[in-house]
Amino acid sequence: MTTGDDSSCHLVRLTHPDYQQRVQLLFRDRDQYLLAFQRGDGRWFRFLGLEVPGLNAEILNLQSSHGSMLRGPSSNTSVGPHALMGMFVELLKFDGAVLNGLTNITNELKRALHWATVMLSEGARFQSVRRHTCQALNTGQNITLETVLWLRMRNWERMSEYWVMCQRHDDNADLPMDLDLVEKMAALDIHSFADIRQELCMLLFNPKALE
């Protein structure tokens, strides 16, 4: 489980031999949220509503969520080398035009940032997403993720609660299980403590869950 300092972040740097410039993406360590990205010319852009102390960044007219980035079913998004290259090129060439004080965005930019969120954020949270992404990169073919994986991504908080509940029950079998939560996990094809441990790489830290 990773909690980390709220201000702790890390960079992912994307380069390509055919391009002199690079793209950098900034992620928050404690939950792997994508906070901002940097174009090849050094300009930074951050998501609306996400503060990044010490970073001089222009504000995107976009929130860091699947719902904000997608225009259609989540299952339309694939992972793999073509998605990675498309993400790199789109972020590299983003023009950063400003409209009403916010940096305007295109559907192509939304798609690129969603690829980054799925492969790099969700891939750090979920073993299955990481496994599919690595398989796609190794085979050179994009893979469309299964519907159940999208459901898991949208229920990371509940899955983290289930982990905590199972851990407590494992320590003390007399503690009751939340049957509604058990049923919710069954719909995600998670049926045991072993299942949840095999799927989650990290928990969404919620202090209330530990009370």
Image (cartoon, rainbow, N blue to C red):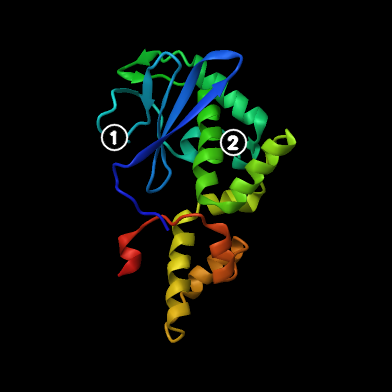
Q: Position of residue 42 (x, y in %)?
A: 39, 17
Position above or below: 152 against 87: below
In space, the residues marked 2 and 1 are separated at their CA atoms by 28 Å
The residue positioned farthest toward the left in the image shown:
54
Quadrant for the N terminus, please.
bottom left
- Residue type, label 2: Gly
Q: Write down the residue under mark 2.
A: 72
Secondary structure state at the residue bearing disc 1? loop
Q: Is the C-beta separation of discs 2 and 1 under 8 Å?
A: no
Residue at the spot 32% in from the left edge and 23% down from the top edge: 57
**Looking at the image, which is closer to me, 99 or 96?**
96
Dividing the picture into quadrants, the one containing residue 97 is top left
Q: Position of residue 158 (x, y in %)?
A: 46, 60
The residue positioned farthest toward the front in the image shown:
17
Secondary structure state at the residue bearing disc 2? loop
Residue at the spot 56% in from the left edge and 33% down from the top edge: 115
Q: Write down the residue under mark 1.
A: 51
Q: Is residue 173 left or right of residue 118?
A: left
Position above or below: 155 against 43: below
> Which numbered disc flags the more N-terminal residue, 2 or 1?
1
Q: Position of residue 124 (x, y in %)?
A: 51, 46
- Residue type, label 1: Glu
Residue at the spot 60% in from the left edge and 63% down from the top edge: 187
